[in-house]
Amino acid sequence: MKWKMLAAAAAAFMTFGVGEALAGRDLDQIRQRGTLRCGVQGPSNPGFGVPDSQGRWGGFNVEICRAIAITIFGDPNRVEFVPVTTQSRFPALSAGEVDVLSNNTTWTLTRDTNVNRFNQPAITFYDGQALMVPRRLNVTSARQLNGATVCVQPGTTTELNIADFFRANNLRFTPVVIADLDEIRRAYDSGRCDVFTNDFAALAAQRTLLTRPADHVILPERLSKEPLAVTLRQGDEELTNIVAWTTFALIDAEELGITQANVEQIATTSTNPVIRRLLGVEGNMGESLGAARPDYVRQIIRTFGNYGEIFERHLGVNTPLGLERGMNNIWTRGGLLYAPPAR
Amino acid sequence: MSATTLPAAPPRGPSFAERATGFLRACFAGPVNSAITLACLGVLWLAVPPFWTWAVTNATLYGTAQDCRAAGGACWAFVREKFWFSIFGLYPFEERWRPATMIVILVAMVVLSTIRRFWGRWLLLGWAVAAPTMWILMQGGVFGLSFVQTRQWGGLTITGIIAVYGLALGYPLAILLALGRRSELTLVRWFCTAIIECVRGVPLISLLFMAAIMLPLFMPQGVTIDRLARVLVAYTLFTAAYMAEVVRGGLQAMPRGQYEAADAIGLSYWKKMRLVILPQALTITIPAQVNTFIGLFKDTTLVVVIGVFDFFTTLRAALGDPNWLGFPTEAYLFAAGVYFLLCFAMSRYSMSLERSLKPGGR
């Protein structure tokens, strides 16, 4: 009995060891299971990942995951959305509860190295700490804020960043420390502080909740860099490639002017070799990536549109969040979105 | 209000007018009482009219978020819009009839179980049939029902499942632990004491975290236990450890004579406990038990840390809907109302149970 158990343990260990050595272990598991497990921010993250009244997930991060599912399976519905919190996201990813995190996780060095060993192959959204002030103050730059009172959450990097910024610019400020974000908003709305600071996207969401959103401006300065990227475990190069090149395809499509409306027409009529390769009309990019079908990009664009269309649908100026493209624009239009060549 | 329902009520109590006059006289008896009464009335005068304006006069019951913002009052339309979502959570929309049926069965079973006349073998049998039926109904995968992962269960449904299953499984376990802790067998006593102290010594939130996040890290690759099952085990253990101490209090409150009398008529240990000690010990601890029950019921909201969308979390998720941003007060009031109703029902039931179980009170 003892020997049998030992042998079983050894066998289990060996299969585990072999699995470790092969690339594509996670991808194999995803294919075998038939669904991609995608961690999204719970309970909800306005514009990025929110369940609607019928319990269906929608939002920017959600559609990124669905696009990845199209690349893997050719089917946007083969995703299980797993809500994670900021505390549980990394253990959930490490333990294999989720395959990828699409929940506004910032790409940092220690998340790439250290004990975590995550990959964050492509940036999906450039965020950064921003400052909001009432329009009546006539302030156009954060450097004019000497002596301002600032509402911040205690114990956050937000609090440290703002202290650094004011010190570096030889400015004084009075912090008003409030733990709860809703309370901070009320305090700012009632004029207890001149400045409301948070990450840009979150700040824009908070602005919609003010009594008169149009009376407040978000200043152009960014006090921190928060490049948000889909996060996955290291050790599966194939899955990493799929995540990266699915994101790049969305960006490329926008740069090339391919939209949900014209993708079919472009695919059949375009003579541009770059477009023909991207949409799988010629070449074998889909095959070398390990996509379910050669025209996976065409299917993604047909289903969700390009990066810009997804952005405008969930975060853009015509949504309650009302975000300008800013840094999240194509590089040819002054933004930072720049995809490596797909060839 | 309960004076008329008391079985031992006097044949003719004071009339309503007499009681009202008595109450008013007490309110203004002496300068201190009068001052307190006036201060209270002042606070009510300041608080109630604005609340009424917000919650009723300017409220919006039908319409969109824009209508709500235009009206300026409470947005009950938001609660109406998200009501069914708060009941069923992330459960697939087309399959919502399944959790709906499950809730009906669950409520029916709980109501039946509260009626003393039905206590007995048949009720246990009913639970033995209902519990797996409800689980199969929810999870599917057989009888042509599509498979729905437990991670998609949510809303008030999951709050009900965790509370009822956790309390129902934890209660017998608690009695065993309490008996074990007072056992004369050293090993049993040590074992039960260790479980109680270890589980009680950590917060529920870390126990849930261990069950949901840490446990899979120690499991061999590919072996997974369902997350909800792990949560239920953690919650059941927690319930058992807390209840065990309440039950132990009851056991210790029993006079020695009861134990000795039961021994004297030659009852075995289990018969002594089942027929003599436990019925009395459990009855005298009902207030403490219900207190613990209510606390544990509200603790179910902590499952949010491991990504389970219970009733409260579902409402918080609804707050993030871009089309309905900015109505947290309405959502929290609704949640408070639901929790209050459920806890109040538990408390009233326990009081009626206490009365009917009192010696000579039948």
Image (tube, coloured by chain):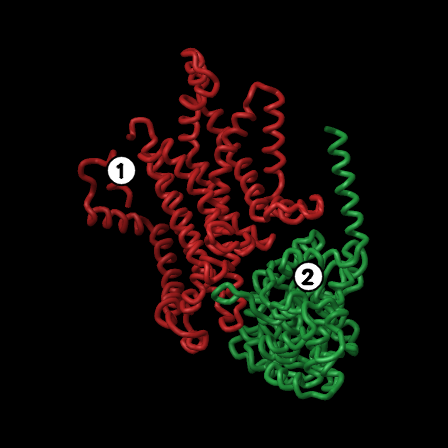
Q: Nearer the viewer, mark 1 or mark 2?
A: 2
Q: x, y (%) of residue B190?
A: 62, 25
Q: Secondary structure at mark 2?
A: strand
Q: Secondary structure at mark 1?
A: loop
Disc 2: CA contacts within 10 A as few (<14), some (14-19) or many (>=20): many
> Would you name the residue on which mark 2 appears?
A100
Q: x, y (%) of residue B75?
A: 42, 69
Which corner quadrant of the image does residue B211 belong to? top right
Q: Nearer the viewer, residue B21 or A103?
A: A103
Q: How many marks?
A: 2
User: Which quadrant, please, contains the C terminus of chain B?
Assistant: top left
Question: Residue B6 got which mark?
Answer: 1
Q: x, y (%) of residue B309?
A: 53, 56
Asked if one can make out residue A142 in the rendered structure from this viewpoint, the answer is no
Q: Drawn colour of chain B? A: red
Which corner quadrant of the image does residue B207 belong to? top right
Q: x, y (%) of residue B298?
A: 49, 48
Chain letter matching colour green: A
